[in-house]
Amino acid sequence: MSDGLDINILTGRAKEIAAEVDNKNVKDGKLSEKEISVFLAECEKNGIEASKEPWYSKCSELLSKNWDNLKGMVKSQLALQNNDVAVRDATYVAPAPEVALMKQEEAKRAEAKETEVSSLPKPLKLGARSNIRTNYEWSEEEFEKVLDQMLNAPRYKGKFKNSVLQGKAKAFIEAGKKFNIDPRILVAISMCESQRGISEKARKLNNIGGLKIGGKYHHFQTVEASIDSIAKTMNTRYQEGFTTASKIAHSGRYCAKHAAASWLSDVNSYLGFFDKYYKDEN
């Protein structure tokens, strides 16, 4: 394992964030691989473009080394658990033909079960490993109440009163229907990527999903257009085989791989609001 990232090589706000992360765990003046993931996610929230900083290469190097070590162990475990076929050095794992076929059939059955939800009395719980397809008939009024809890609960003391996500329940529901994506995941991603709608990108660019074109954050004409774009992107990822938030995160096809754990934690926390506050009208 690596010695970690020395906090003293950092400067300014990045150094302050690193110290805060270090203080929450073992305070040793260094960030472990796990702490680096949290640190980078916090930098993003604070508007720091880590990839442009001189210390970013060191972070990437440490995370890459840890990932390489883990891959071999994980693949070996998968081979034992799933009756997979692996070469001697565990550098590649492939399911045995009959096992692969069984897994494909199981996946199809699971997807069918997860997407046939319109007749249920209330929505299924959505988590990081849940299928993100949906055809549930959402109540705009109840959906808006959940957004209100995320943005206007007394404990936030008006911090998010000017959020661009205020009153956008209809936009999330319609985008979800248009692309057959659960609108709850659209909300969770938007909240995560835009600091609940108050980030500079959200306010100046109407960009609540952190979406880039040509390496630059895209300027949307409206927040609704940004919501649509997130739903379209999720649909594309789904068609590529990334059918859950967890798969999307770890694919590196939405958020950076090194930030996957922190990103998923944030997304899950926002999904939890729906479990607690969404009340079906039926």
Image (cartoon, rainbow, N blue to C red):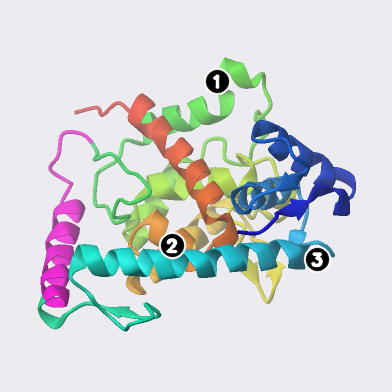
Secondary structure found at label 3: helix
Secondary structure found at label 2: helix
Alpha-carbon span between mark 2 and mark 3: 24 Å
Query: Disc 3 residue type?
Result: Lys
Circle 3 sits on which residue? 52
Query: Disc 2 residue type?
Result: Ile
Q: Residue at image x 22%, y 62%?
A: 81
**Which numbered disc covers residue 109?**
none
Label located before the other in sequence (2 or 3): 3
Q: Residue at image x 62%, y 52%?
A: 37
Magenta-colored span: 99-122
Quadrant where the C terminus sits is: top left
Secondary structure found at label 1: loop
76 sits left or right of 124 in the view:
right
Circle 2 sits on which residue? 248
Circle 1 sits on which residue? 153
Front in this rendered view, residue 107 or 144:
107
Query: Disc 1 residue type?
Result: Ala
As displayed, is residue 105 above or below residue 280? below
As displayed, is residue 188 above or below residue 133? above
